[in-house]
Image (cartoon, grey):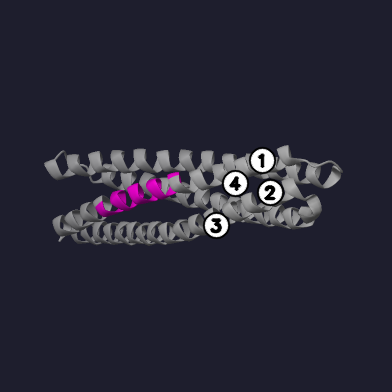
Amino acid sequence: MKNILYIITVFASSTMMAQNSKEAIQDHNQIKVDKKLLSRDIAELENFKSETSTYKINPANKQLLINSMAREIGQTEAKLARANVEILQSTREVGTDRREKRKNRRKYEGSNDDLKDMTRDRVNTRDDRRDKRDDKRDSEEVQNRLENQKALLANFKASNAKEVNILEKFILTMTADINETKEELVEDKGEVREDRRERRDDRRERRENL
């Protein structure tokens, strides 16, 4: 019976290590993606500002601005899709935490190691639930920005007047997008630190089970 319990414990520990390693890879990849998006979005914002300045003098480049706004909307739609994927990932992470907590409760005997495991489980669950809330909030913000951008583009297309005000509002949405990407980079780096801590805990638990 002890051998069976040992095998189950080692298998569960290995599964958790694999899950945490997968999350670490995802977080590192997300940092790379966010850095690329940030550089692209900053360049496109400056270009759109330049196009807007030209439009103020001569509105003949209206179609150019319409094309830029449509491109930006397409990119916002892609970001919304990624944000929804992140919600699914954080939901899975919360589910993994629940399974790990149940496993530790089943083998709980009151030792110092058991107490450490329970404390670690509470910290991991708290962090992953926070990440899920943040992901949902980010998705809602992107959705609201997308709807705002679409409305601004529709109004700009429909108007025959020189609608500089619409363009300035669109610039604000692009600026908000850049600021959110900067915030996400900070959050991603924080998650990488959490990943390191979780992997250290995994290695410690693995040694204890050997």
Classed neighbour count for the residue bearing mark 2: other residues with Cα under 10 Å, few (<14), some (14–19), many (≥20): many
Amino acid type, callout 3: Ala
Where disc 2 sits, the SS reads: helix
- Is residue 187 found inside the magenta-colored segment of the image? yes
Between marks 3 and 4 in the image, the one whose residue lies nearer the viewer: 3
Classed neighbour count for the residue bearing mark 1: other residues with Cα under 10 Å, few (<14), some (14–19), many (≥20): some
Going from N to C along the chain, the mark reached first, 2 or 1, is 2
Q: What stretch of residues is rendered in magenta?
A: 183-196
- Identify which residue, 203 or 148, lies in the foreground: 148
Residue 43 has which mark?
A: 3
Residue shown at the point (22%, 51%) measured from the top left: 201
Amino acid type, callout 1: Glu
Q: Position of residue 85 (x, y in %)?
A: 54, 53
Amino acid type, callout 4: Met
- The residue indicated by pointer 2 is 52
Going from N to C along the chain, the mark reached first, 4 or 2, is 2
Between marks 4 and 2 in the image, the one whose residue lies nearer the viewer: 2
For the residues labelled 3 and 2, the Cα–Cα distance comes to: 14 Å
Classed neighbour count for the residue bearing mark 4: other residues with Cα under 10 Å, few (<14), some (14–19), many (≥20): many
**In the picture provided, is 174 more to the left or to the right than 14?**
right
- The residue indicated by pointer 4 is 174
Going from N to C along the chain, the mark reached first, 1 or 4, is 1
Residue 168 has which mark?
A: 1
Q: Position of residue 25 (x, y in %)?
A: 37, 62
Residue shown at the point (27%, 45%) measured from the top left: 104
The reply to whether discs 3 and 4 touch (Cβ–Cβ < 8 Å) is no
